[in-house]
Amino acid sequence: MDNSSDLSFSELKEFLDLKAAHFEQPAFIQEDPILLPHRFQKKEDIEIVAFLVATISWGKRQSIIKSGERLLEILGPEPLSYVLTYQDGTCPQFVHRTFNTTDLNGFLLGLKHCYQNGGLEVAFANSSPLLEMCILSFREKFIPFLNPRTLKHVANPSTGSASKRLIMFLRWMCRPAKNGVDFGLWTAISPAQLMIPLDVHTGNISRKLGILKRTQNDWKANEELQAFCQKLDPKDPAKYDFALFGLGIYENF
């Protein structure tokens, strides 16, 4: 399917629906960072592990998983308990690329504040249907506990950031768990509100398919891609993340 941008809308939808169903399977998560929060059963433990693993999800997936395993050593078998009893400055050594011990210390303090005030889902909740507003609500509650150098690790859509890792985390939390990949733990954000986590793979494939015209991977590109995916499936636009990512990383489309 080399000339895929010439597909009709119905042909493109059929193609992407098939690919999304093919890649949204437990077999594919064995090589994906989402496998780490799947080791936990308690809602809050899953949230904490997923949030921290999503935060360090840049670079090669094997490297992310290796650093994620180190995070699990630090958090122990009960991540919520670890977070709620965490004391400033007691963080063990941790480094993943530019995310270091100072950053993890700030993130643990921010998480502690969130869980002392209703939890992470409450921190993201916003009456606006726009995902941007949910992320900004979260930032407002979370960033007061961060060292200035750590702020760069909390994406800000209002400055144009594609916010890939936060959007990926929200996909994990909000999309239904029926296929054994995402968790479907949250109701504060509807699957219909979700966006595609925009990275080099999803961006390149979207452009090759002719469904994304914007050349930059930024927030405006998120909005353009979301608008198209909502036409494909208004109730679950983010499912096409599986199709676009899978086509890029597994099929070299």
Image: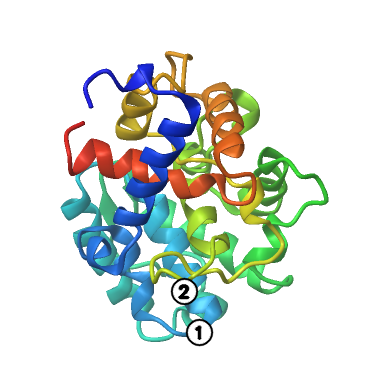
The N terminus appears in which quarter of the rendering? top left
**Spot occupied by residue 35 in the image (x, y as percentages of width and height):** 30, 68
Report helix, strand or loop for mark 1: loop
Question: What residue type is disc 2 on?
Answer: Ile
**Spot occupied by residue 100 in the image (x, y as percentages of width and height):** 33, 50
Measured in 3D between alpha carbons, the distance from the residue under mark 1 to the one under mark 2, in whole angstroms, is 6 Å
Q: Dots 1 and 2: beta carbons under 8 Å? A: yes
- What residue would you read off at disc 2? 46
Decide if residue 157 is on the left or right side of residue 22.
Answer: right
Report helix, strand or loop for mark 2: helix
Query: Quick check: 251 above or below 42?
Result: above
Q: Decide which of 59, 105 is in the foreground and name it.
A: 59
Decide if residue 117 is on the left or right side of residue 197.
Answer: right
Question: Residue 217: in sight, yes or no?
Answer: yes
- What residue would you read off at disc 1? 42
Q: Decide which of 85, 7 is in the foreground and name it.
A: 7
Question: Residue 14 falls in which quadrant of the image?
Answer: top left
The C terminus appears in which quarter of the rendering? top left
Question: What residue type is disc 1 on?
Answer: Lys
Query: Quick check: 204 above or below 35?
Result: above
* 10 Å crowding of disc 2: few (<14), some (14-19), many (20+): many
Query: Quick check: 222 above or below 212?
Result: below
Q: Decide which of 150, 164 is in the foreground and name it.
A: 164
**Spot occupied by residue 118 in the image (x, y as percentages of width and height):** 73, 72
